[in-house]
Amino acid sequence: MMISNATILRIDTGRVTGAGSVVWTQGTALAMPAVLDVPTSRHHYELGAVIKDASAVVYVLDRVLDEDSREALLSKTLMRRIQVQATGRDAQVWDVVATDDRVHKGMGNVEVFVKGVTP
């Protein structure tokens, strides 16, 4: 059983054009269970300035990640956005600030630090 309060609906990737603007490519539809929370003091202590702009963290268990989604979330070269729908709320698009791949007591998860996208 997995406790989940959110669902990742898609992972978008972005690229910078010659004019300096970002063009986003919408990812395929997903229904990936996740947990949406705020960064903890441990996160701030360990990651410091790397996550200074993050307003939330999305936890995704390794067992629900397919290889393409895992690669897209953990990429250090791609600009990424994720669309997340918290239980009982409208979907929201978040810019990915940083990611961390964690394993603890044999259970792995990806932590995705995000900030809200302003319209």
Image (spheres, helix red, strand yellow):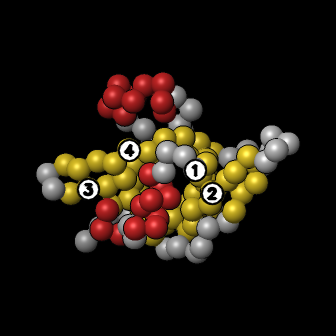
* Residue behind mark 3: 108
Residue at 79% across, 48% down: 17
Q: Is residue 89 left or right of residue 49?
A: right
Mark 3 vs mark 4, CA separation in Å? 11 Å
Above-or-below relation of 64 to 51: below
Residue at 61% across, 48% down: 79
**Mark number displayed over residue 78:** 1
Mark 1 vs mark 3, CA separation in Å? 22 Å
* Residue behind mark 2: 13
Q: Label 4's element?
A: strand
Q: Label 2's element?
A: strand
> Is tag 3's residue or tag 4's residue first in the polypeptide sequence?
4
Q: Which quadrant of the rendered structure holds the N terminus? A: bottom left
Above-or-below relation of 119 to 1: above
Q: Label 1's element?
A: loop
Residue 16 pos. (x, y %): 73, 46
